Amino acid sequence: MRTINVARDFSRFPAGRYRRNGRTSGEAFREDLLSAPLSAGETIVVELDGTIGYGSSFLEEAFGGLVRQLGIQPDTLLKRITLTSSDPTLIEEIKGYIRSTEKKNK
Amino acid sequence: MDQCGNGWAYVVNIVGLVVGWLVVHRFSKQRDLERARRELACSEIDTLLELVDEIFEAAITYHGGSTRDIRAERSIKMRLQDLAQRLSALRGTSQGAAEITAAQRRVLALRTAATGSHFEDDFEGSSTSGEDSIASVTDAMLALRRDLVCLKHAQFP
């Protein structure tokens, strides 16, 4: 199991959806840190505390984008990702994006 | 014999006084603690309401703006995070668990509305999507304000 701390391993200022919106975008986070271990079948823990906050566009692209990029079922993805945060609404929001991406794909 | 009876009566009176004082003291302490808890919760809810107003002002200024403002983006995200964490922490002192859960859903909706579409991208000038964002932020803000007021009322069952 790999632990990814967003603030430590990526940025304290995650921002934007696509790489063209900045170096710390959701697309960059997904492609640089999340995709490889998940593609290799690893289970990951994502620690969300420590940043200045998250925008929904970043979260949707980083986590909802995993379903689109890897083509795996949301339920399977949710079993392989553990999210930790002092803000329970953040976890709920991310899970919502992962689940709703399935609906878009249907 | 009379002296013995008087002595017992005296002891019973004293014991009655002490027990009565203890009972009154205990209820009085409970009442004071409850009042302090209620004041703390209400004060914190008032702070949350102010924070919601600040987020609303910042979000409509941002979405109505003509260029991307990174400083405003960070400020909005920080305030939203502060709002969510403070609301979560209220579970320790506040009554109304159902009202807190409802308000947390509204915070999620406000974050989605304020930072979902057309956020942190290089938009050019006010647009229809900017107006849509302002409308969504307004709806989410009003709903959250209403739920926070309900939470405040829940402190007075």
Image: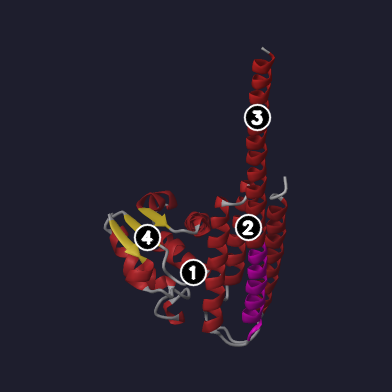
Disc marking residue B14: 3
Give above or below for B51 relative to B108.
below
Q: Chain of mark 1?
A: A
| Magenta span of residues | B46-65
Q: Are marks 3 and 1 in contact (CB under 8 Å)?
A: no
Left or right placement of residue A16 versus residue B151 in this view: left
Disc marking residue A46: 4
Q: Name the spot of residue A22 as percent of width and height, x first.
A: 43, 81
Q: Answer yes or no: are tags 1 and 2 on the same subunit.
A: no
Q: Amino acid at mark 3?
A: Ile
Q: Chain of mark 2?
A: B
* Colour logic: secondary structure
Residue B122 visible here = no
What residue did someone put label 2 on? B40
Left or right placement of residue B31 versus residue A90 in this view: right
> In front: mark 2 or mark 3?
3
Image point (38%, 70%), residue name: A7
Whether the magenta-drawn stretch holds residue B98 is answered as no
What residue did someone put label 1 on? A54
Q: Residues within 10 Å of mark 3 (few under 14, many from 20)?
A: few
Q: Name the spot of residue B20 as percent of width and height, x first.
A: 67, 33
Q: Residues within 10 Å of mark 4 (few under 14, many from 20)?
A: some
Answer with mark 4 or mark 1, whichever residue precedes in sequence. 4
Q: Name the spot of residue A38 as percent of width and height, x first.
A: 31, 58
Q: Answer yes or no: are tags 3 and 1 on the same subunit.
A: no
Residue nearer the viewer, B110 or B54: B54
> In front: mark 3 or mark 1?
3
Helix, strand or loop at disc 4? strand
Instruction: Give the alpha-carbon distance from disc 1 to disc 2, as whole Å.
Output: 28 Å
